[in-house]
Image (cartoon, helix red, strand yellow):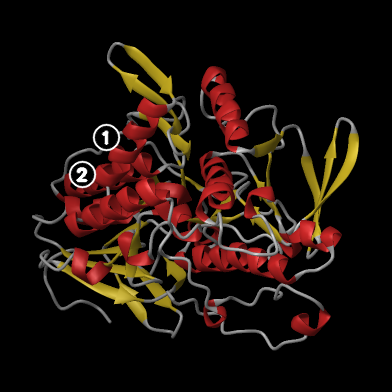
Amino acid sequence: MPTLSPRPHVLVIGCGFGGLEAIRALRRAPLDITVVDRTNHHLFQPLLYQVATAGLSAPSIAAPIRHVLRAQANVRTLLGDVQRIDPQARTVTLEDGQELHWDHLIVAAGATHSYFGNDAWAPHAPGLKTLADAFEIRRRVLRAFEAAEREPDPARRAGWLQFVVIGAGPTGVEMAGTLAEIARRTLVGEFRQINPASARVVLVEGAERVLQTMPPTLSESARRQLQQLGVDVLLNQRVTAIDGEGVTLQGQDGAQRLHSHCVIWAAGVAASPLGRQLAEACGALLDRAGRVQVEADLSLPGHPHISVIGDLAAARSGGPEGRPVPGVSPAAKQMGRWAAANLLRRLAGRPTLPFRYRDYGNLATIGRHSAVVDLGTPLGPLRFSGYLAWLFWLFAHVYFLIDFRSRLVVLMDWAWAYWTHERHARVISDLGSRQFPPMGDGAARDRPAQSPHATEP
């Protein structure tokens, strides 16, 4: 319903990194803000793989949005899924038909998985974007070891003990390295019929090197560190098929088949479907990933009261001729603050400024004592790898967690895991599984689908 307040009403869709930064930047402004998110929590996605691999529990990296914004009196929080944006009426429609009116709109709806037109692969190779994804991957990884313990046939057992990660970006590299550590350190001595250390972890990349956004020297260092952990890195391999029994690859030497019951997708990202609806309503253009092309100040062409930020925005630093802004959390945060500042400039009758992205660098962890860091400094790039890079990655991620409690809990959990190799969140709950084909034989596949709503065990 329309707001009765005489103050301008700002509606923010999504409370990820970009949305949250925009809201916080407006905390002292004479505005009424409504934030709508399809979940009730803000998620620290860079550590989501730790939940998927049982290293952390969900509350360590997720915090209720209402709690995070409890001290900001000009904010109202709503749990809802935006289905439609009407730029002419200045309304958004939620899944139950409710309409919300706005004077200024900031769209930070984020991104989802992209299977490059092969959506039939999704049930067999879950991606990692939400807590539900993390719970599902954790369930599949742990159940694979359990199924291998029960399997008397060595050939079939090998399929349970082969884990395939597709995509060698930061998420894929971190996931593959952690899976190798779980097999070789965490599960040692816990099984009687199998040796978990015999599990094979395969990282598949279609390009010629891992971590494409990093310099070649760091990419090569990451590849070597992965191999030292026991990960098989397959480069220049294109995925042609994924099913319940494994993955088919096509490379320069022909096709090969990897038999696996646990395949993880870390290869592609696509903007939220809301971006397409918004672009059609506003006459905006989309790029190949479905991101909305925005003006230099992050607004939509012809619609200065609508800003698009984060993974949903196809932005360039400094204007049309600038370099593309990457889809990473530091960029989303900077865009959130910039969009808020430009909103205040509009309200004051001042011209807006073109967004300028400051690249602080990239980091990726590979495993214990293994990481790569590429930092931008006033004196030039600073690049290093190994133990010091691992320490830098660790403390940087702890620093940027949402609150003090999360920092304390994560530090304690990591310290315990460092000395004991234990992962305390190794709990399987099939009640939390999504509607993916159950793992196992034909009898298992005939079971009714579980609830699609994931819960933390």
> How far apart are the two marked residues, 1 and 2, measured between alpha carbons?
9 Å
Q: How many marks?
A: 2
Amino acid on which disc 1 is placed = Leu
> Residue at 33% of width from left, 40% of height from top?
394
Taking 39 as reference, is 201 above or below it?
A: above
Q: Which mark is residue 364?
A: none
Q: In what element is the residue under mark 1?
A: loop
Point out residue 19 in the picture as x, y percentages from the top left corner. 31, 56
Residue at 8%, 55% in the rendered image: 28
Looking at the image, residue 329 lies above or below residue 158: above
Please identify the quadrant where the N terminus is shown.
bottom left
Q: Is residue 346 left or right of residue 299?
A: left
Crowd tier of the residue under label 2, counting other residues whose Cα lies within 10 Å: few below 14, some 14–19, many 20 or above: some
Horizontal side, residue 144 vs residue 401: left or right: right
Q: Secondary structure at mark 2?
A: helix
Q: Which residue is mark 2?
A: 341
Circle nearer the viewer, 1 or 2: 2
Residue shown at the point (38%, 56%) measured from the top left: 108
Instruction: Tell me whether circle 1 and circle 2 mark residues in contact (CB < 8 Å).
Output: yes
Using the rendered view, name the quadrant where residue 210 is placed.
top right
Q: Is residue 110 visible from the viewing direction of this image?
A: no
Residue 437 sits above or below residue 43 on the image: below
Res 194 quadrant in image: bottom right
Q: Which residue is mark 1?
A: 353
Q: Looking at the rendering, in which quadrant would you find the C terminus? A: bottom left
Towards the viewer: 81 or 61: 61
Image location of residue 212, percent across then percent down: 58, 30
Q: Is residue 224 visible?
A: yes
The residue type indicated by label 2 comes to: Ala
- Indicate whether 112 appears above or below 256: below
Q: Earlier in the sequence, mark 1 or mark 2?
A: 2
